[in-house]
Amino acid sequence: MITGPIKNLIREFRKLPGVGEKTAMRLAMHVLGAPRQNAKALADALIEVKEKIRPCSACFSMTEGDICEICASPRRNRALICVVEDQAGLMSVENSGTFFGLYHVLWGRLSPIDGIGPEDIKVGELVKRVAAGGVEEVILATNPSVDGEATALYIKKALSPQGVRVTRIARGIPVGGDLEYADALTLGRALEGRSPY
Amino acid sequence: MITGPIKNLIREFRKLPGVGEKTAMRLAMHVLGAPRQNAKALADALIEVKEKIRPCSACFSMTEGDICEICASPRRNRALICVVEDQAGLMSVENSGTFFGLYHVLWGRLSPIDGIGPEDIKVGELVKRVAAGGVEEVILATNPSVDGEATALYIKKALSPQGVRVTRIARGIPVGGDLEYADALTLGRALEGRSPY
């Protein structure tokens, strides 16, 4: 019933994050019924993004030119670098409206299980960037997951010979959250990271 | 920050069913970080599906040839036609493994709010198909939504001059469901559709 091209499309949809077998099937069924120009427009947008968008030569965030808007901005604090795992992390920090330094996108996190080592992510580039001087603080904003923590620890060690200040974003109870529903690890971190009041 | 091609990709992702602003952004961010060949493979799969897959000339389900596998099968009961809204509906009925007749895919449902009338879906084709003879029963398996019910009613009226038996799939409590959590409409339908026991 599900012939070659449809099976193929389902398989490609499944590679997207958060898309399982059922969702992939649903998306493929939608494409079958949708106008041809819609499928064409999505296909073109995918190709165009990969053709026109490249990593910024300074921070590796994705941009149309050689240098991204943030790195090019004269209003950014160049002494402050926020290290994120990917573009989504960068967007989240940027959307919080509370950070005015520069970024460094690692494009991944250390994960021995998946065979991802330091040479697979932009750690060496970060060390070089800090070595070039002018950086006072590196904020590690990798995810508070096992891999994210391991990555943060690795970067801290890699930067230690340079004497730059290295900080880690706070882990604790989300604003509006409830202690009752917080897991023990988070609550532990919230206590550990308490501040004078 | 989000430049032309990325904005474009987000907009195209948003057109997929169940994809809102946040998911579209997440998918686009994933594409930015994924290998170029993955984006290319998805784009190619989208184009290929629209190029190779066409509606079956008998039942309008999507297929690679002129006639779909089901319509071409000699083991199917040709006197029984199950009417569904789209390919997903057909797949659901087919996957239940309880139907051995033919299908008719409407490719939509009547929806005055969206300006979708009978001429926009394959109703006329169904009437013609039944008029050609050999059909004993038409099972209306449009969704039990407002639009799906309106569509079923419209088809019933359109087929009435032909004297063919028209039935509607049962609406009731899902198997494994719980009366306590059933809404009043569903429970009402379940009572209305009760059968001798």
Image: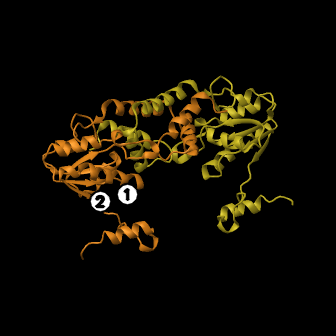
Chain colours: A yellow, B orange
Kindly indicate the quadrant of the structure image that contains residue A110: top right
N-term mark: 1 or 2: 1
* Residue at position x 70%, y 45% in the image: A141
| A14 or A114, nearer to the observer | A14
Q: Are marks 1 and 2 in contact (CB under 8 Å)?
A: yes
Total marks shown come to: 2
Neighbour tally class for label 1: few under 14, some 14-19, many 20 plus, Cα within 10 Å: some
* Disc assigned to residue B169: 2
Against B153, residue B64 (above or below) is above
Name, please, the residue furthest toward the bottom: B197
Residue B159, given in percent of the width and then of the height, sits at 23, 50
On the rendered structure, is A46 left or right of A163? Answer: left
| A69 or A155, nearer to the observer | A69
**Callout 1 secondary element:** loop
Residue B46, given in percent of the width and then of the height, sits at 40, 33
* Residue at position x 29%, y 59% in the image: B169
The amino acid type of the residue labelled 1 equals: Pro
* Residue at position x 66%, y 40% in the image: A91
Q: Label 1 lies in what chain?
A: B
